[in-house]
Image (cartoon, rainbow, N blue to C red):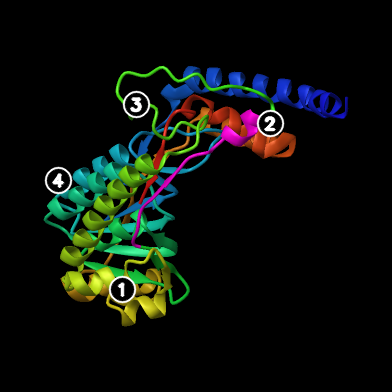
Amino acid sequence: MAKKDDKKKWYPALKILVMLTILSFIVSLFFSAFAGDSAKADGNVALIPVKGVIISENYRVFGQEVADSPTIVRFIEEADRNPRIKAIILEINSPGGAPVATEEISRAIRKTNKTTVAWIREMGTSAGYWVASSCDKIVASRMSATGSIGAVISYLDFSGLLQDYNVTYQRLIAGKYKDIGTPFKELRLEERRLLQNYLDQLHDYFISAVAENRNLPEKEVRELATGMFYLGEDAKELGLVDVLGGKEEVISLIRDDLNITVELVEYKQEAGLADLLGSVFSQQSFFIGKGIGNSLAEARNFNRLEVWT
């Protein structure tokens, strides 16, 4: 009886959250045309933000900031084509992200003919560091979190919960690994080994990319690639960062290297009305119950493994 009463207490909050979710998506679709990109016409150094989780599509839930690779790649290519732009700064504040999206940004950086500098703010870890390593130079604060060279697969396992409620997972598949990672059954040893092999391969790609980008011996990078992050000062000693500092040091680096007076041009995606409304809804969702909100937002991904670098 107590369990039923506990469940009933969540119903009003759940209904409100569902209504807010539906309204948010409707408004987002209706007003998406008001969003656009912005970059000042004057200036000779492009400043491109890479903030939030790096993903391969511009997908925002409740105004949450993400670094989507199509937008960032487009900004890099536009700056590269602009004859007034002499250098590109990647302003990074990212904990990591999806492997493919990360590689897309990395390739765009390496293809450009302009001087590139990564400016790591609070955090440039995992995929965020992969992007930073693709630049000619890396500037970070002595307190910035960097490195964390590794990969992770995560998913929720509800198999024990289903047993508690006497719910059975009926398994019908074509292809023995088709439901690998489903949250409704425990991961088998063979499946665990397959996923670990996949992770190890991603890890090798990451290590090779950093070694090449930073001109470091692969063996040396492999020893650092434990998944642990390093503060800026330690990262500099290990060869993962070139200069300690912030915006002034970034500007000085470009000024001295190219012998120019640096005038920044910020490339950014303007927030539309949908993003502003989404931000308001996000505050409401937080107080209603962040855990429930996340569960609803990720409901469509129940049979999906999350892979991050």
Question: Is 90 colored magenta in this rendering?
Answer: no
For the residues carrying marks 2 and 4, which lies nearer the camera in this image?
2
Tell me the residue that label 1 is attached to. 241
Question: N-terminal of the two: label 1 or label 3?
Answer: 3
Horizontal and vertical percent for residue 24? 58, 24
Question: N-terminal of the two: label 4 or label 3?
Answer: 4
Query: Where are the magenta residues, as a range?
Result: 149-163
Query: In the rendered view of the protein, which quadrant contains the N terminus?
Result: top right
Q: Quadrant of residue 162?
A: top right
Horizontal and vertical percent for residue 147? 36, 66
Question: Is 154 colored magenta in this rendering?
Answer: yes
Tell me the residue that label 4 is attached to. 81
Question: N-terminal of the two: label 2 or label 3?
Answer: 2
Q: CA distance from mark 4 to mark 3?
A: 44 Å
Residue drawn 73% across and 34% down? 288
Question: N-terminal of the two: label 2 or label 1?
Answer: 2
Horizontal and vertical percent for residue 90? 31, 57
Q: Quadrant of residue 125?
A: bottom left
Q: Three-letter amino acid code at disc 2?
A: Asp
For the residues carrying marks 4 and 3, which lies nearer the camera in this image?
3
Left/right of residue 284 with respect to residue 252 in the rendered view: right
Tell me the residue that label 3 is attached to. 178
Horizontal and vertical percent for residue 253? 26, 74
Q: Three-letter amino acid code at disc 1?
A: Val
Disc 4 residue crowd, few under 14, some 14–19, many 20+, Cα 10 Å: few
Of the pair 20 and 223, the residue shown nearer to us: 223
Q: CA distance from mark 2 to mark 3?
A: 25 Å
Disc 1 residue crowd, few under 14, some 14–19, many 20+, Cα 10 Å: many
Question: N-terminal of the two: label 4 or label 1?
Answer: 4
